[in-house]
Amino acid sequence: MNADVLIVGGGIQGCATAYQLARRGVSVLVVEKDYIARHASGVNAGGVRLIGRDLAEVPLSRQSMRMWHTLDEELEADTGFRAKGLINIAADDADIAALNDRQQKMQALGYDHERIISRDELRERLPFVDPTCVGGAMSELDGYAIPYKATNAFRLAAERHGATFLEGTELAGLRRIGEAWLAATSRGDISAGTIVNCAGAWADRVAAMIGDNVPLSHAAPMLMITARMPHFASPVVGAVSRQLSFKQFENGTVLIGGGAKGFADRAANRTRLDYAKLAQASRTAIEFFPIMAKASINRMWAGLEAYMPDNLPVIGPAVNADRAFHAFGFSAHGFQMGPVVGKVMADLVLTGASDFDLSAFRIDRYDRKVL
Amino acid sequence: MSAALTLSEHGRSALVLDRGVAPGGQIFRSVSTSPLPDRTALGPDYAAGAELVSAYTNSRAKHVAGADVWHIGEDGRILYSHEGTTKQVEAREILICPGAIERPMPIRGWTLPGVMTAGAAQVMLKSDAMVAENAVFAGSGPLLYLIVAQYLRLGVKVAGLVDTTPAENYLKAAPLLPAALGGFGLLRKGLALLSEIRRAGVPVYRNATDLAILGDQRAEGLVFTSDGRQEIKADTVFLHHGVLPNPNMTRALGLAHHWNEDQLAWHVTKDAFGQSSLPHVSVAGDGGGIVGADGARHEGTLAAMNVLTRLGHFASDQRDRLAKPRLAQLRRLARFRRFIDRLYQPRPALRLPQDSETVVCRCEEQRLSDLRQGFEEGARDPNALKSRTRCGMGPCQGRQCGPIVSGLLAKWQDLPVQDVGYYRLRSPQKLLSLEEFSQFQTVVPDEGGTK
Ligand SMILES: Cc1cc2nc3c(=O)[nH]c(=O)nc-3n(C[C@H](O)[C@H](O)[C@H](O)COP(=O)(O)OP(=O)(O)OC[C@H]3O[C@@H](n4cnc5c(N)ncnc54)[C@H](O)[C@@H]3O)c2cc1C
Ligand SMILES: Cc1cc2nc3c(=O)[nH]c(=O)nc-3n(C[C@H](O)[C@H](O)[C@H](O)COP(=O)(O)OP(=O)(O)OC[C@H]3O[C@@H](n4cnc5c(N)ncnc54)[C@H](O)[C@@H]3O)c2cc1C
């Protein structure tokens, strides 16, 4: 088998990259060791969030947000995207101070998508919030989508443009032979002109096959979802400094996150939950929204996610090999970035350059000059 | 109860967490507190359960009634709901005995109000002395006949018994009969039930096929083919065609399972003593593979003997000596079970939905056509299909649709069910109140915490 471009990993980054390349006529093959959207991209919280992004990520994230707003038409699919807005709740005056501080930095850079809201507006938009909360910040563009559907929407659109997806196919080794990459997979050899590493929590292993070392770690953020409840919250809810994050879907179920982590066993493709931490997340949810005491948890799970030490992804060319590119390490907020990452990767593969400044995302940003 | 009794006889205590309001499990449900004026209507086996329950109640076992276990971790941590809070215990050895659930029968209309399982009929009878007059019973297998007989003994009118046992099953099962004779007593009990039903004048329709529930908003009866097209009007239809191991706890724990072709069911992979793929976790009774009430008692005892060995109470040769007669009896019961499994093996057309509009997943209202569409869009695996269609995501955690989904994906790909696999399940195994969960407590068991 061969292809112009071999993409390793069938998460949202791999699928979006495949789509952007295939629609520009490139022959693309995606290998996925499990099935498409089996890992982070299929089981995440679906938050499509621009608010609160690291300043280095804002340009990419803003572009991605624009793409989300027209993604269903573009992919001719239902990604479940809803722009319901997102509110980060300020629990106290220290939170308000932090928001004011950020507001100044954002304004200096000319960004206006985040807006501080008063206690009254908070109460108006979230009538069930605990009355002690003092205000918050809001982004109207934000919302959520359905992760499994969105990732597969990219996959199906890519297939319509001729991309091939090989599920149950694991990349085991890579060799550079002349101008081509020879990939050994669990289903035989594949030769390709270019490699794109979108291997999520396993991406450091693929990077090593390419020749790049990277200080990637992985962890298992946990989520729980309730049975249907009467509608009480339209926007997605987060908090400025507390471990609180939830959204109520249109069917009434409430997805509760907050960043608590379980135990990750990536070799076995498995995660284990830390119930004491989930119990803490339940307490926090009830504290901020007393109505949640009436909720019933239906399912709990965790996904394997890749983290960089600075919580910023790696996006860009390999440093120790030609014709290889990386997009991984999204540190628990990469779902929102999927659309733009596909575009950036396709530009890098086809032109060697991107419209965006990718210097903060270099793979070698942790390489030390001296020992 | 049998395992706890064995442990108790050897001076060990066990913590028994049971969701039920009183000890007894499924078969001896409410035996010590039966609301019926005369519990002998439920049969002599039921009354005999009172003896086991009283021995158990007087043993060293610590029984916690109303303890709903919603998580068992491979680290030995158990979380359960009890009196409005989530409690945690840690156990060195764990024995899981979640019993059986009824095999779903996804015929057209099976999710309408008024359609219930025969097991539900029995639970209502045993716990609340409630019955449904003039109901239709449809399906096959000893439990179906038993509940009809229990109804008749209480003087409740039954509109009809629609027996779906395929005529050819009698031929297929016949060669197994000689080997099953060891269990002749049991077989005779089954036959006696059927003739009791016929003598009572209940219309019995045999070799029934093409079943469908009548009615749009709620059940109004049953149509089927048996010597021509038949129709019985009734407000209540009870369906039953066998039981399956209750899978959620053993699955969520990640124990190895395999497909058993005789029982057309997933079994927990375990050794003769019930030890699973996790050495400190054993499984006994119907929850590991259907063995029946007598088999469950032997398996519980054997698992306890093995646990005693693992805890250093006695050596493995002593365990083996003690176990020998039990193992022999289990083998005898297994021969009978194979006969029963063959005889009452359900028709494929009743195990898997035939009509594209038939609901497969009650919780998320997914129909056969929705699943087929998900399959055609690329979902080949039960988990991929779940993510795509939401089938199996509801509060029952796939208990109902799981076996159907594995079966459909196997059929559509012409693959063995074993290769298709099952849902990847997670705790909690029931809806868990957020408020309860937020009050999380650790319980320290009295003696070593053997469950
Ligand atoms: C619980 C949870 C909640 C989250 N919530 C949000 C949120 O609300 N908003 C948000 O924006 N982000 C969120 N995220 C983060 C987001 O899900 C991820 O950043 C994003 O999905 C990463 O996409 P990916 O394609 O890089 O990785 P993945 O989806 O992990 O895909 C990588 C794929 O590569 C495959 N692979 C790895 N090695 C090989 C190999 N050698 N051969 C073949 N295939 C291989 C893997 O099997 C995997 O399927 C969350 C993550 C988790 C876990
Ligand atoms: C509906 C039904 C009716 C039956 N009727 C008869 C009959 O009339 N005669 C007959 O011979 N056989 C009958 N059987 C079969 C018989 O009940 C079983 O063979 C026998 O009870 C198996 O014993 P067991 O210990 O494996 O399971 P069970 O007796 O079912 O015991 C399992 C116990 O586990 C508890 N449990 C399950 N999950 C949890 C949890 N998460 N947390 C806490 N506790 C939990 C249950 O409450 C129950 O007490 C019936 C089976 C079913 C399903």
Image (cartoon, rainbow, N blue to C red):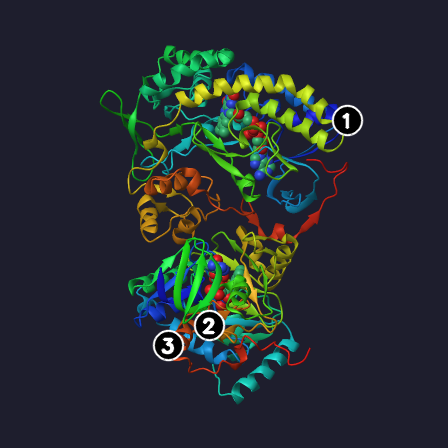
- Residue type beneath disc 3: Leu
Badges 1 and 2: C-beta atoms under 8 Å apart? no
Which chain is mark 1 on?
A: B
Q: Residue tagged by mark 1?
A: B11
Picture coordinates of residue B188, whole percent (x, y): 46, 11
The crowd level at tag 1 (other Cα within 10 Å; few <14, some 14-19, many 20+) is: few
Q: Quadrant of residue B234?
A: top left
Position of residue B229 relative to residue B408, above or below, is above
Q: Element type at marker 3? A: helix
Q: Residue tagged by mark 2?
A: A325
The crowd level at tag 3 (other Cα within 10 Å; few <14, some 14-19, many 20+) is: some
Position of residue A346 relative to residue A278, above or below, is below
Location of the N terminus of chain B (image quadrant): top right
Picture coordinates of residue A44, whole percent (x, y): 49, 61
Tag of residue B52? none
Name the mark nearer the viewer: 1 or 2.
Answer: 2
Which chain is mark 3 on?
A: A
In the picture as drawn, the residue positioned furthest to the front comes out as: A178
Front residue of this view, candidates B411 and B385: B411
Q: Element type at marker 2? A: strand
Q: Residue tagged by mark 3?
A: A350
Residues at marks 1 and 2, CA–CA distance in whole angstroms: 65 Å
Front residue of this view, candidates B38 and B191: B191
Location of the C terminus of chain B (image quadrant): top right
Front residue of this view, candidates A318 and A366: A318
Position of residue A15 relative to residue B119, above or below, is below
Q: Earlier in the sequence, mark 2 or mark 3?
A: 2
- Residue type beneath disc 1: Gly
Residues at marks 3 and 1, CA–CA distance in whole angstroms: 75 Å
- Residue type beneath disc 2: Phe
Q: Quadrant of residue A282?
A: bottom right
